[in-house]
Each structure stands twice: as C-alpha cells, then as structure tokens.
Amino acid sequence: MIHVRQLTKSYADLRRGQFVALAGISFDAVPGEIYGLLGPNGAGKTSALRILSTVLRPTSGQATVNGYDVLTQPSLVRHQIGFVSTNTAVYDRMTAWEMVEYFGRLYGLSPEPLRERMEQIFDRLQMREIRDLLGAKMSTGMKQKVSIARALVHDPPVLIFDEATAGLDVLVARALLKTVGQLRDQGKCIIFSTHIMREVERLCDRVAIMHRGHILAEGTLAELRDRYHESDFEELFFALISQHDGESSRAASYMAAL
C-alpha cells in the first residue's frame, strides 16, 4: 500500500550549510495496519509524511501510495489519502457540515453519494450536535473531529495522522486514538506519527524509531524488545537515540581531525 525507498530530503541552510531532514529512509505499510513513526521533534517524521501527501518534493528516492508515485502522479496520490494533524485549519465561517461537504466536492463526489457518506461519518464520529456549529465557535476537540471527517469523506484507503493528539485534552485524545484503531479494523492503511510512547504501545502494529532523519530500528514492539533485550520500550527508545548521537558525535570529531 505504501512503499518508501531511500527517501531523502535536504534543505539549503545559510548558517549550517546543507541540512538533511531525511537521510535515505525505507519502509512499507500495508492495509489493516497502523505503522508508527516514533521520534523526537526534528526526527524527520513530518518531512516524510509531507512527501507522502505530495506537499513536499523529495530530494531523491521513491515513494508510492497504493501504486501511485508521489512525484509523477501527485493528483492520484491525493485521492488515496486522508491527512490529519493538529495544524489542519477549520474555517471560522463554515459549519461542520459545510466544511466536510466542501472537501467532498473538491474530491469530485456527486451530491447524493456525498450526502449519504457524510451522514455515515457524522454518525460514526458522533458529530450530530455540532453539525450546524460554526468553526469559530468550536472547541479544539470539535475541530479535530471535523478534520477527521474531512479526511474520511472520500473514503481513502490510506490515512496519515501527524502528531494528531498534540495539544488535545486527555478525553479528546483518547477518543481520537479509539477512532484510529477502528479505522485500522476497517482495513485502512494508517501511518501514525507521534513522540508519545504510550500511543505507540497502545496502537501500533509496527513502528519505526526515527532520529535526525534516520530510521534507527523497525519492527513490532515484541520484535524490538527481543532484538535489543529491553522490556521497557521507553528505555529501548532512549538507548537507541543516545547510541546514534554518540556515533554521530564521534564521526564528526573524526572528520574535523582530518
């Protein structure tokens, strides 16, 4: 469903020179699976997801979504995905219903199938009470529900959640995680980016631990714990990060000495 091979992204930085956000990462995600990207801020998670959603162009490498190439077939890729983050805007002067309907029309859905689809989504996400509420009057949790609804309106096979629980209160975050799990059970392929260990342990079928543009380790939680002989996943995470930073520091010192 999602295939990423040797994906890189670099930027020109006036102070630091070339900044590498992604250093040749590769991974696959399949239907009926939540694939987690776990890493601290600056790990490269958002860069990877923006490339998959065709917002960013990679410097090199290849990524396909449901068989479509993100570089050569971006419009087709966009029809395959729904994207949710805490930065997804909700228009102040549109109601929840108007907002989701607007995005459904952007995806080319005809009026009657769109209305039926929206009725189903509003029931599933328990959005009836905010159907006619303007965006300007919505709470953070309400806005997040609208963001999910508009990501689902065209029934995409792939869903991308980029730090989607950041800034949410515990009840709203819990409801969001429950929704993500239900979508996985419906056969969706889900990429779930987070820096919160508990979310990974609760949700993810497989996980890639990212740091400074690299994937340090990948597998199920059980496989990672067995591979690194560490039952505490948080300790495993910090050990990998520290090891990578130590190796990078030694490499930099060696190059400076040449």
Image (cartoon, rainbow, N blue to C red):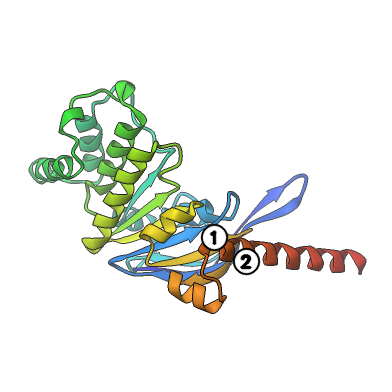
User: Which mark's residue is nearer the viewer, 2 or 1?
Assistant: 1
Spot the residue most to the front: 231
Q: Which of 195 and 137 is in front in this view?
A: 195
Seen in the picture, residue 11 relative to 228 is either above or below; the reply is above
Q: How crowded is mark 1: few (under 14 residues within 10 Å), some or many (20 or more)?
A: few
Task: Indicate which disc residue 240 carries.
Answer: 2
Residue 71, visible in the rendered structure: no
Q: How many labels does the image show?
A: 2
- Figure quadrant of the C terminus: bottom right
Amino acid found under the numbered disc labelled 1: Glu
Compare marks 2 and 1 and give the one earlier in the sequence.
Answer: 1
Query: Which residue type carries mark 2?
Result: Leu
84 on left or right of 132:
right
Which residue in the protein does label 1 denote? 234
Please tell me which residue lies in front, 102 or 84: 84
Q: Quadrant of residue 22?
A: bottom right
